Image (cartoon, rainbow, N blue to C red):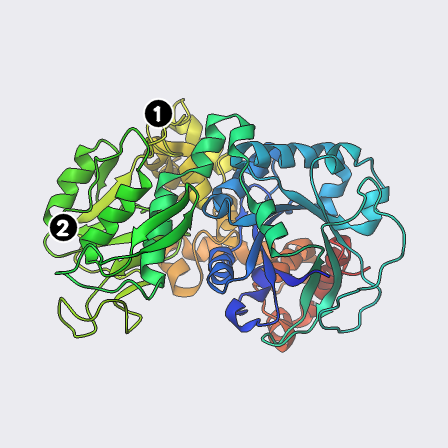
Amino acid sequence: MGLNGIDISGWQDDLVVSAMGTCDFVIVKATGGAGYSNECFRRHADETLASGKLLGCYHYARDRGYEGSAEAEADHFIAAFRPYVGKAIPFLDWEADALSLGPSWAKRWLDRVKAKTGVTPGIYTSKSVLFTYDWAAVAKTYPLWVAQYPNYEETGFLSEPWTDGWDFGAWSSPLIFQYTGTGRIPGYGGHLDLDLFYGMKDDWRRLCAVAGASAGTGEVKEVAISRANVAAQIMEHFCNCAEHGYSHPGRHGTSGHCSVQTDAGVIKVTKGDRDCSSAVCEAWELALAGTQYDGLITRYNWTGGMREMFVGSGLFSWKPMSFNAKRGDIYLDESTHTAMCVRNDGAADLLAEFSISKTGGIDGEPGDQTGRESWVHDYYSGHWDGILHYNGKADGTAAPGESGSGAPSGDVSELAARVIAGDFGNGDARVAALGDRYEEVQAEVNRILLGGSSGGSYDVDAMARRVIAGEFGNGDERRRRLGDKYSAVQKRVNEILGASGTSSTSMDVDAMARAVIRGDYGNGEERRRRLGSYYSVVQRRVNEKNRERGYFQ
């Protein structure tokens, strides 16, 4: 008895979770090393939850080219995992280059994730690794997700997959068993890793739970009960529940209640309609209930009064549209409209908003008859005046990245050098690590890398590594962002990845294999076409790396 699931990464960028009807759970790669972030992570994780499936998130330890200390890699993962605390089981993927570091490194990562999130992570590795090292200290606290394959044959989900009949070393039994890397299930045209969870849905949910009280640190409390996340959870309920539609006359609901599961527990909201401002204000009013700031935000407000109320509370600051909005932040057109940011992953935000009644006017039947009276959708430019940004102090501490939250001290040039060296990660992880010094430090980084130092010189190698890491996008976007540096930097990228075409000896096979594994070269015939004469040698290295990762046993 158990649950069937899959684990996916950037390789499966075209997978649609809602199409995987026979799948009970999905474990999605979030990060690797101290700097790699899976571009598909947030989309696949959100799709998993929206489809009613159980969610897991994993980090690939010591991802080559992005290596960091156990603490740096844990922090990089935590930055991506924060929106899913309490909703997903975290895992450490322990294979390949990480193996030589031994269980002590893995335990430091696991301990840090547990301390900072309040959630107990699991560890993934191949069966053979269990008998190579002493895992007693890890097995005492952290559950096992193990991989072992009988062969390379295609198979669907199995209720009793093959095992070698041996024990599991320091663990009495695994939590999850991965039994193939060549699985085939309806809803996806390619191969998938297939997994069996030895438990039921309630067991999975218990493993997602935050042990806030026992963790005993203020940091856990802040992560576990992020008021911004609670507000976003309430707003997402408003937009996803058909009980709530748009009405200006009926902007505070009708009668009866819905129960919303949030990080702060179950919160009751009145059934019925809202308008744009009452919904956003109510979500924040309820999110702050029970804190010392209870009552500072009220649903009885309108767009023209929101800025004064939110900023006046001392919890929010007014930001220009150039600011990178966070989950729970509010886009505001002070004359006509407002919406909440419920996701930002470095691409376009997702907005939750109440739009217009099914009649095309300001009132109609209670509830959402169209699915678009209240809904979550991609960001649109609109006529926003600015962003109300939550400063994160409702629990007595500043949110990561805000003033008072431990932004690093030191000279800006010193911090910029550390950024270039990789000490602060990329994307949202860098924003969180630098706090309110992010803009000045990033400006100095850009100046150094884009031609501001040494008489207009710049570090081509450093910029090429950033391009390979995905920081400058692809195609025309990359050309636009690099400007007059494009030709030189792209030439170096091609050299690093082996695409210069000069000779087979000039290419970095490992770098190209990593690019293939990330999904940069597609699959099947597309990969063969794009790699050209390098296909055989690169694919051979890809296969070797996959064996190292336990995908082939």
Q: Nearer the viewer, residue 315 or 203?
A: 203
Q: Quadrant of residue 241?
A: bottom left
Mark 1 vs mark 2: which is more N-terminal? 2
Q: Quadrant of residue 289?
A: top left
Disc 2: CA contacts within 10 A as few (<14), some (14-19) or many (>=20): some
Q: Amino acid at mark 2?
A: Thr
Report the residue at 25% width, 65% height from top: 245
Residue 463 in the image, given as x and y percentages of width and height: 47, 47
State which quarter of the image contains the C terminus. bottom right
Number of the label disc, if any, that sits on residue 476: none
Classify residue 145 as left or right of residue 221.
Answer: right
Q: Nearer the viewer, residue 231 or 45?
A: 231
Q: Amino acid at mark 1?
A: Gly
Marks 1 and 2, how far apart in space?
30 Å
Where is mark 2, residue-wise?
A: 303
Give the tally of numbered discs.
Answer: 2
Disc 1: CA contacts within 10 A as few (<14), some (14-19) or many (>=20): some
Report the residue at 75% width, 64% height from top: 180
Secondary structure state at the residue bearing disc 2: helix
Number of the label disc, if any, that sits on residue 404: 1
State which quarter of the image contains the N terminus. bottom right
